[in-house]
Amino acid sequence: MERLAGVSIAVVLFAVFPAAQTSRAAISITAAGSWVDTIDENDLAGGPGSDLIGAHESAANQVSLGITGTTGGTDRWRVDVRRVDTTWHTNLHLHLRRTSNGSGPANRISGGTSYQEITDIYRTFFSGRGDRLGIDVQLRMTGVSVAIPAATYSSTVYYTVVDI
């Protein structure tokens, strides 16, 4: 079992905490979900002596976002995202993408359907109009390797809604 020394990486990716920013209306965002992925010998790419599978994905609906408190279907908003690391290895990269439009009046949501890396700087994730509930988000971590010391790594993702 010596081949497993240094291979087991327990990764706690993040708990999602909503953040809200308002300007004209009482618009707010809610977020529900977290992702914990334990990486071990079962994630070896080719058996003993090989590297770990480099990319890991959550379920397509791992996080659910809701935007409420808009003034109606013409009230425009955008969701910005950033992360704050608790313990993180610089070789690991965290990405997210929107996998559903959620529900609400008409289909008034755009962007965010391709994976984008989450950094420590707020970046636009997607935008829309009016209230939307059940917007699904999927997460992906890349850069996983046996070269990364075995440890628990964690980061928190912050979602902010901006009334535009």
Image: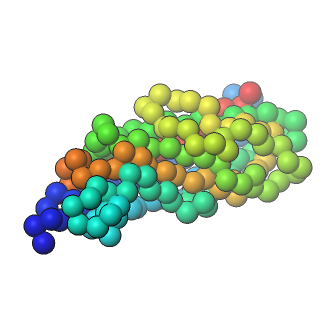
- 91 relative to 104 in the view: left or right: left
Colouring scheme, one of rainbow, by chain, secondary structure, one colour: rainbow
Vertical placement of 41 versus 131: above or below? Answer: below
The image position of residue 153, as x and y in percent, is 30, 50
Residue at image x 78%, y 47%? 131
Q: Quadrant of residue 115?
A: top right
Residue 148 position within the rendered picture, expressed as x and y whole percent measured from the top left: 23, 47
Residue 96 position (above or below residue 56): above
**Front residue of 121 and 46:** 46
Q: How many marks?
A: 0
Task: State the image coordinates of residue 77 (x, y, percent, origin top left).
Answer: 73, 34
State the residue at coordinates (36%, 45%).
143
Seen as rendered, the residue at the extreme left is 2
Is residue 151 visible in the rendered structure shown here? no
Provide residue 46's location: percent of width, then percent of height. 32, 63
Residue positioned 19% across, 50% down in the render: 149
In the visual, does 99 lie left or right of 51? right
Horizontal placement of 16 versus 67: left or right? left
Q: Is residue 91 visible?
A: yes
Quadrant for the C terminus in the image: top right
Q: Quadrant of residue 86?
A: top left
| Occupied quadrant, residue 103 | bottom right
Is residue 143 shown above or below 35? above
Q: With respect to residue 43, does 89 lie above or below?
A: above
Q: Does 59 sit left or right of 56 as displayed?
A: right
Q: Which quadrant, please, contains the N terminus?
A: bottom left
